[in-house]
Amino acid sequence: MRYGEADRILHLYTPARGRVGAIAKGVRRARSRFGGRLEPFFRIQAELHEGRGELLTVTGAQTIDPHARLRTDARALDAAARACDAVGRMFETGEPHPGVFNLLCRQLALLDAQAAPDGGSGAAGRGGSLSFRLKLLLAAGLAPQLGACANCGEPEHLVGFSGAAGGVVCAACEAGSFALGEEAHGFMADALGKSLTEAPVAGEQALGQVERAVAATLEHHAHVRLMPAFAAA
Ligand SMILES: [Zn+2]
């Protein structure tokens, strides 16, 4: 955010202090000592001074990875913004979650590596974005139960998903749930079990069900609402 005449307030996600707000003084001046290093989606090594106020002050910054390719691909850039927004909303306190930090670093690196002018698939696609969100759920301790009915334990005839129950539900327990097909079920299990680079693929209908399942889980258990995982072209 622009602040004052030449300053900027930054939202940083850190391995040791979770989400922090910091002010970078003079960063918008042409000859700022930060020299364009405090831009969105940069991975940086920052020196921060803690005063009495709520905001830390940035006193130094070195670039670890500017993710420069990402900026050439509108889809990748959009996916990066959605990834950062999801982390910021789901992990908005100063409580450290190094696993979340590492996950965000991997997602940004992946978006950067796959960036291309005709992008929009892979990590920057809806499936990639949802795989990332499922991994955030896992890191938050909110991974949906997928192996058996979350209500009664029935291992078969799983036909729906219930945010309140915290996972898939069987035909007998489907009241209050919505339909979740086999493809969506498989996508969720794969996304949770595999690395981001091996993100599964699924059709649009299945991805719609996955997105609804992620949203229902977050609303019921964290009272968090995210923006859509993907902007339709
Ligand atoms: Zn059941």
Image: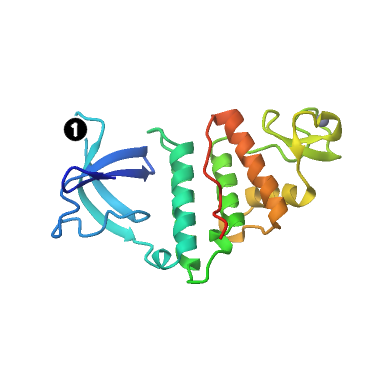
Task: Name the one closer to the observer, 231 or 175.
Answer: 231
Q: Quadrant of residue 80?
A: bottom left
Is residue 203 rendered to the left or right of residue 78? right
Quadrant where the C terminus sits is bottom right
- The disc labelled 1 sits on which kind of residue? Gly
Q: Name the residue rendered at 32%, 59% in the picture.
A: 64
Residue at x 19% of width, y 52% of height: 27
Q: Position of residue 155 (x, y in %)?
A: 83, 37
Residue at the (20%, 59%) spot, across then down: 35
Front one among 107 and 204: 204
Q: Is mark 1 within 8 Å of ligand 1?
A: no
Coordinates of residue 75 in the picture (x, y in percent) = 49, 61
Residue 34 appears at what percent x and percent y?
20, 55
Q: Quadrant of residue 137?
A: top right
Looking at this view, name the residue that lies furthest to the bottom.
117
Q: Which residue is mark 1?
A: 51
Between 83 and 141, the one lying in front of the other is: 83
Is residue 220 visible in the rendered structure shown here?
yes
Q: Residues within 10 Å of mark 1 (few under 14, many from 20)?
A: few
Above or below: residue 210 compared with residue 219: below
In the rendered image, which quarter contains the N terminus? top left
On the rendering, which quadrant does ligand 1 occupy? top right
